[in-house]
Image (spheres, rainbow, N blue to C red):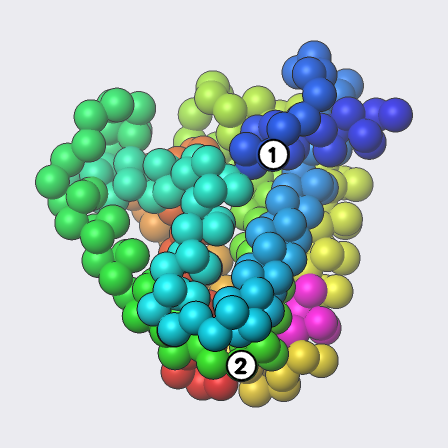
Amino acid sequence: MTFLKSMIISFSMYSKIPMPRIEWKDENMKYSLIFFPFVGAVIGLLLCGWWRLSHTLGLGIFMKAAIALTIPVFISGGIHLDGFIDTLDALSSYQTKEKKLQILKDPHTGAFAIIGCGIYFILYFGALTELQDMKVYMLISLGFVLSRALSGLSLVLFRSAKKEGLLYAFSSTAHRKITGIALSVIILLCGSAMLFVHVTGGIALLLAAALVFWYYRWVSYRQFGGITGDLAGFFLQVCELVMTVAAAVIV
């Protein structure tokens, strides 16, 4: 029953999929991060379903890409995109670590964040228009699982920049050993599935994800003194973009 409650909390936090109301207490939250990648699995299934439907309807590549671009944002409710934008604001400020952490909490959005978000969507849309095969869509769909598994693992392995906020609440209440093992297994299974679908493409996406994961830790520690919820969202968005671009170029 605890696992079920943890799953409900995970989907309630990281998606807009309707879920029953569950009390967010430590006992119910300790396995929540394990189910974070399952939100990515839902996004991936919808993405593959959309490719099939759009192909059946004979839609053009621009409409295919436009809907494919909105599916992750719609399902997640934009929670990770919000973190991406806040992080761009903080990084473009060139302030001290303390000031950057304050900027992350600022509800106002700066010009550089808007510009960065626009560039992000242009690159993402452009990469999606290059994906012409169902196998490539399957790779990208698995990428949504991989990015969330890595993001969840970072909450277990990396230090937090502050002792407050939703990220700290999830990381501090998590059963670290079980969560770490479970997410590692999911990463291995996801990587194996990628290689099975397309060897070259799978290697490219795995290398891209590993590179962004390293960059995420480096930037977080160097610029902020640790990770935050916004930085985790930043990693997730950048990871998915880089994997999609890699798929467009390599496959």
The residue range painted magenta reads 190-195
Q: Is residue 144 magenta?
A: no
Labelled pair 2, 1 in contact (Cβ < 8 Å): no
Q: Please give the residue where the numbered disc 1 appears in the rendered image.
A: 17
Q: What label does residue 133 carry, if any?
A: 2
Q: Amino acid at mark 2?
A: Asp
Q: Is residue 209 left or right of residue 88?
A: right
| 3 displayed left or right of 91 | right
Identify whether 31 is placed above or below 38.
above
User: Which secondary structure type mostly characterizes the magenta part of the structure?
Assistant: helix
Observer-nearest of 240 and 129: 129
Front residue of 195/118: it is: 118
Query: x%, y% of residue 150?
Result: 58, 53
Q: Residue 167 at what x, y percent from top left?
A: 52, 29
Residue 173 in view of the camera? yes
| Residue 156 as seen in the image, left or right of residue 250 | right
